[in-house]
Amino acid sequence: MSIFAFYFAGNLLREAGWPRKLGMFKGEGYDATIVDLAWGQSMDWGAALGAGRPRLALQMIAEIYRGVDWESDDAPDFKVFVERAQEGPLSAAASPQQAVQLPQFAERMSTISLKQFTDPQARSTMDQRLQYALFWGLSYPDRFEAWYASRVADYESQLPLYQRMGLEIDELPSLQQFYEDSEQILRDFERDLAPLPSIPSRLLADAEQLGWRV
């Protein structure tokens, strides 16, 4: 089972000092709003790889489907699967998180226990969502770039307010730097866990038929 989304979100949360003690009887865990943000950023990361590093995104898909014999008659019809996904939320989405329709845990709980966060089923669910973020970036790279430009513009418009409040806020990276940073996170994943597999020829052929820029 791949753990791309869990790897990204877990590292992000650790850098922010989580998990933390939740209370006398609750043990360690996370603030649910912080977890929602971390999962959301993992989807942005996946979409960035799809849009800006499509061959790496295909290697991630190959990892997600590790164990599948792509050359057998029983191999999944990947092209049809993606086309069906494109008919759903992907087609109308203007951002990575709209494309994957992430659940918002903070809407129904204030904290998430360490056990809940590391649950294998929860990790699998988030990797399924990340797969759709990859699809969206691969399918609509221009839409991803428009979303990122809008995000940067909105962020920069708020900088004067942050500065007046005395907050030291870093600027968002350029699009190309964001692609490079996203690739580096994936390289860290390979360093920490295992190298990504090569792209199966059938997967590459399907990607080309789907019009992905690979």
Image (tube, rainbow, N blue to C red):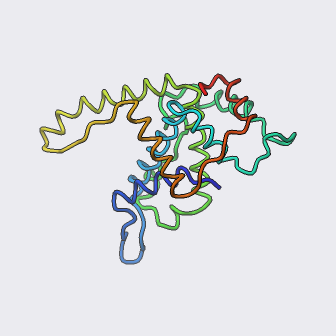
Q: Quadrant of the C terminus?
A: top right
Residue beneath the point at 47% across and 66% down = 113
Residue 132's image quarter? top right
Residue beneath the point at 55% across and 39% down = 100
Q: Is residue 105 above or below residue 44?
A: below
Q: Is residue 41 above or below residue 161?
A: below
- With 172 as the anchor, is 119 left or right in this view? right
Q: Is residue 116 above or below residue 100?
A: below
Q: Quadrant of the N terminus?
A: bottom right
| Number of marks | 0
Residue beneath the point at 52% across and 63% down = 116
User: Residue reaching furthest bottom?
Assistant: 24
- With 133 as the anchor, is 32 left or right in this view? left
User: Residue reaching furthest right?
Assistant: 73
Q: Position of residue 38 (x, y in %)?
A: 43, 50
Q: Position of residue 151 (x, y in %)?
A: 36, 30
Q: Position of residue 184 (x, y in %)?
A: 45, 44
Residue beneath the point at 42% across and 66% down = 29
Residue 181's image quarter? top left
Residue nearer the viewer, 148 or 58: 58
Q: Position of residue 211 (x, y in %)?
A: 64, 22
- With 10 as the anchor, is 204 left or right in this view? right
